[in-house]
Amino acid sequence: MKHLDDKKLKHVEYRIKQYFTSRVIQTKQPKKNVEFFLINANNSLMSAKALFDLSTNKDFQSYTHYEGLKGFLWVINASYYSMFYMVRALLAAKGVLIKSDLSVHSVTFDALIYFFYLNGNLEKHFFEIYADAQEEASELLGKRKADEIVLDYYFEKDKRSTFTYETNEHAMQSKAKTSLDRAIKFQREIRKLIKKLP
């Protein structure tokens, strides 16, 4: 998924209808667990940062007695989970409850697309951020930023679930750094959006 094409978006809409029918997704629910998800998102992001720092700093490794640790795979996992919990917090803040033990990650991604991307809420959020730019440029930037946020989450979800072992340490470190950077940006933007919800 290099972009959010119409075919993939139609599949999301179809699955969402099934989730409503089977009550996997319920709306207009009490806005509970937001803080729980925010804490988990923050803890996951701090874990990713700590593991990245520990994996890249030989002095830190020596001081903590973790010489040779290469925790890049777990940086990727923790980064993804910080994004996952941020989306769960966002959905909970909107009164959306997900009741699924199976495929909760896929359901969460579909819910993000349905409740915040397809209806333009992400785009509107980013449009407001860029409101001091020209109107036409702001609309393009808002749409581009919304696409970017959703794709970042998708890529990290996909990377976490399909990551294969790589012997090239530099490649692994680079992927971990990308994951961490995406998670930091994602958390910052989703927190802003949660604050704007009624």
Image (spheres, rainbow, N blue to C red):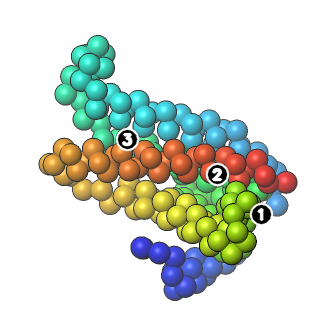
Q: Which mark is residue 126?
A: none
- Asked whether residue 19 is in view, the answer is no
How far apart are the alpha carbons under marks 3 and 1? Answer: 33 Å
Q: Is residue 191 left or right of residue 55?
A: right
- Residue 54 in percent (x, y) is at 32, 28
Q: Secondary structure at mark 3?
A: helix
Q: Please, what is the three-letter code of the amino acid marked with disc 2?
A: Ile
- Asked whether residue 69 is in view, the answer is yes
Of the numbered discs 2 and 3, the one sitting upstream in the chain is 3
Q: Which residue is mark 1?
A: 27
Q: Secondary structure at mark 2?
A: helix
Is 102 drawn above or below residue 188 in the view shown? below
Q: Which mark is residue 190?
A: 2
- Residue 48 in percent (x, y) is at 42, 37
How far apart are the alpha carbons under marks 2 and 3? Answer: 20 Å
Residue at 70%, 48% (x, y): give it: 192
Q: Which residue is mark 3?
A: 75
Specify few, some or many for label 2: CA neighbours under 10 Å numbering under 14, 14-19, or 20 or more: some
Observer-side mark, 1 or 2, equals: 2
Q: Please, what is the three-letter code of the amino acid marked with disc 3?
A: Val
Is 133 drawn above or below residue 30 in the view shown? below
Q: Is residue 147 left or right of residue 3?
A: right
Q: Please, what is the three-letter code of the amino acid marked with disc 1?
A: Thr
- Residue 131 in percent (x, y) is at 73, 61
Observer-side mark, 2 or 3, equals: 2
Residue at 32%, 60% (x, y): give it: 162
- Residue 51 in percent (x, y) is at 36, 32
Q: Quadrant of the N terminus?
A: bottom left
How far apart are the alpha carbons under marks 1 and 2? Answer: 19 Å
Of the numbered discs 3 and 1, the one sitting upstream in the chain is 1
